[in-house]
Image (cartoon, grey):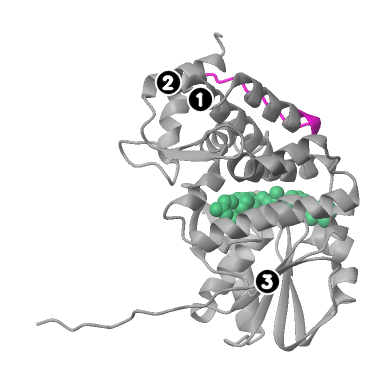
C-alpha cells in the first residue's frame, strides 16, 4: 500500500535589500534584536533611534567566531521562550556575519520557523553574509556544518556602521567583493582596480554592485545546486588554511584572499587564466592589505583536508576555478597532480 502526499508548491521568498541610511521602522509585533556586547556598545543607541516595536527585547551573545555554536543558539532560543515569542514575532540580526548566521538559524528553528531581518554591520556581512539566506553555526566537526536555508524578510544595509569597523575587518570584506567581481563581472573588477573603497560614495556604489551580483546568483540557484557554488571561489583552499591555523591567524576574508590566489595559480596552470590576470587580482587584494601568501607545512596533509569541504565527496574535490576575470568554472575533474604542483609552490621546500 502507498499513500501519496502531494506537496508541490510555489513559494515566494522574495525580499528587498535597502542600501541607504536606515529608515525609521515600527514593527507591530514582538521583536528581539540579537547582537553582541561590542556592536551594542557602539551602535545600539543609533539602532534604537530608528527601530521600534510593540515589545522590543535585546539578546546578546558573546562576540567571536568561536561563539557561533549551539550554546549561543540555546541562549537565543531560551530568551525567546522566556519572553513568550510566538510565530508572528520577529528577530533582527544586528551585527556581522557571525550574528547574522546565528540569528537566521535560530529564527529558522524557533517554533519551526519565524521571520527575521538582517541589519549587517561589517563590510563582509553587508556584501555577502546577510544576503541569500544561508544560516548556521559551527560544531566540533567544522565550520557552518549545521544550518538551514532561511531567507530574511528584508536586509537593511547602512554604510554608516562601517565608519567604526577596524581596517583589517574592512579588508576581509573587500576580499568577498573581489570574489564576486572575478567570478561574475569583469567590468566591476576593472572599476575596483581604479577605485578607492575608503571613499564613502564609491563604497556605497561598490556594496550595491556586489549585492546585485550575489542577488542574481541566489535568485537563480538559492540552494546551491550549481551556480551558487561559484561564490565559494577561494573558499576551498581558504577553509583548509583556516582549519590548519585553528581559525585564529587569519580572518575568514583573509584566508579567502590567499585561497583565491591559490585558485588563480591553478587556473594559470590549466591555461584558464593568464599570469597577468592572476597578478592583477593579487595586486588588488594587496591594495587592501590582504595576505596573498601562505607557507604549507605538509602538502599531502593540505590536500587531504580538502575532503572535509562540504562540496567534496569521498572520492572527488570540487574546485571553483576562475576563467580569466569575470567568469568561472565549477569542476571536480582537476587531476591531483595539477593541484599538488600548485600546492608545492606554496610548500616549505619551494
Ligand atoms: P564577525 O561577525 O565576527 O564580525 C567581525 C568583528 O567585527 C566582530 O568582532 C564584531 O563584533 C565586529 N563588528 C561588527 N560590526 C562592527 C562595526 N560596525 N564596528 C566595529 N566592529 C564591528 O565577522 P564577519 O566577517 O562579519 O562575518 C564572518 C562570518 O560570516 C563567518 O562566520 C562566516 O562563516 C559567515 N559568512 C556567512 C555567509 C552567508 O552567506 N551566510 C557568507 C560569508 C560569511
Ligand atoms: N557566501 C557564499 C554563499 O552565500 O553562497
Residue found at x 59% / y 36%: 242
Ranked by sequence position, the earlier of labels 1 and 3 is: 3
Tag 1 and tag 2, C-beta contact below 8 Å:
yes
Q: Which mark is residue 16?
A: 3
Residue found at x 54% / y 69%: 150
Q: Nearer the viewer, mark 2 or mark 3?
A: 3
Q: Which residue is mark 1?
A: 266
Q: Which residues are magenta?
A: 286-298
Ranked by sequence position, the earlier of labels 2 and 3 is: 3
Position of 131 relative to 234 (above/below): below
User: How far apart, in angstroms, are the residues tagged by discs 1 and 2?
Assistant: 7 Å
- Using a 10 Å C-alpha cutoff, classify the residue at mark 3 as few (fewer than 14 neighbours), some (14 to 19) or many (20 or more): few
* 268 in the magenta segment: no
Q: Which mark is residue 338?
A: 2
| Position in image of residue 81 (x %, y %) | 60, 82
Residue found at x 57% / y 86%: 87
Amino acid at each position: 500500500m502507498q499513500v501519496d502526499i502531494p506537496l508541490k508548491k510555489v513559494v515566494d521568498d522574495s525580499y528587498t535589500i535597502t542600501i541607504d541610511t536606515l529608515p525609521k521602522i515600527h514593527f507591530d509585533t514582538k521583536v528581539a534584536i540579537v547582537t553582541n556586547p561590542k556592536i551594542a556598545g557602539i551602535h545600539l543607541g543609533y539602532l534604537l533611534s530608528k527601530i521600534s516595536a510593540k515589545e522590543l527585547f535585546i539578546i546578546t551573545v558573546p562576540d567571536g567566531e568561536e561563539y557561533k555554536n549551539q550554546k549561543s543558539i540555546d541562549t537565543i532560543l531560551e530568551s525567546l521562550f522566556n519572553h513568550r515569542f510566538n510565530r508572528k514575532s520577529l528577530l533582527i540580526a544586528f551585527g556581522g556575519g557571525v550574528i547574522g548566521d546565528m540569528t537566521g538559524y535560530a529564527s529558522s528553528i524557533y517554533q519551526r520557523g519565524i521571520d527575521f531581518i538582517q541589519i549587517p554591520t561589517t563590510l563582509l556581512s553587508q556584501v555577502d553574509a546577510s544576503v541569500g539566506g544561508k544560516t548556521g553555526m559551527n560544531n566540533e566537526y567544522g565550520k557552518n556544518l549545521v544550518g538551514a536555508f532561511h531567507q530574511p524578510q528584508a536586509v537593511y544595509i547602512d554604510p554608516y556602521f562601517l565608519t567604526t569597523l577596524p581596517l583589517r575587518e574592512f579588508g576581509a570584506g573587500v576580499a568577498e567583493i573581489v570574489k564576486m567581481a572575478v567570478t561574475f563581472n569583469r567590468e566591476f573588477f576593472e572599476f575596483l582596480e581604479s577605485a578607492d573603497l575608503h571613499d564613502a560614495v564609491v563604497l556605497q556604489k561598490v556594496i550595491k554592485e556586489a549585492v546585485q551580483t550575489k542577488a542574481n546568483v541566489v535568485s537563480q540557484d538559492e540552494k546551491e545546486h550549481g551556480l551558487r557554488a561559484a561564490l565559494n571561489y577561494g573558499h576551498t583552499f581558504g577553509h583548509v588554511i583556516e582549519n590548519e591555523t585553528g581559525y585564529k591567524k587569519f580572518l575568514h576574508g583573509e584566508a579567502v584572499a590567499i585561497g583565491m590566489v591559490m585558485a588563480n595559480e591553478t587556473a594559470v596552470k590549466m591555461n584558464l587564466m593568464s599570469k597577468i590576470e592572476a597578478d592583477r587580482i593579487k595586486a588588488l587584494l594587496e591594495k587592501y592589505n590582504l595576505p596573498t601568501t601562505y607557507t604549507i607545512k605538509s602538502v599531502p596533509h593540505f590536500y587531504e583536508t580538502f575532503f572535509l569541504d562540504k562540496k567534496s565527496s569521498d572520492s572527488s574535490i570540487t574546485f571553483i576555478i576562475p576563467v580569466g576575470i569575470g567568469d568561472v568554472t565549477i569542476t571536480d575533474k582537476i587531476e591531483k597532480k595539477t593541484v599538488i604542483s600548485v600546492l608545492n609552490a606554496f610548500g616549505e621546500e619551494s
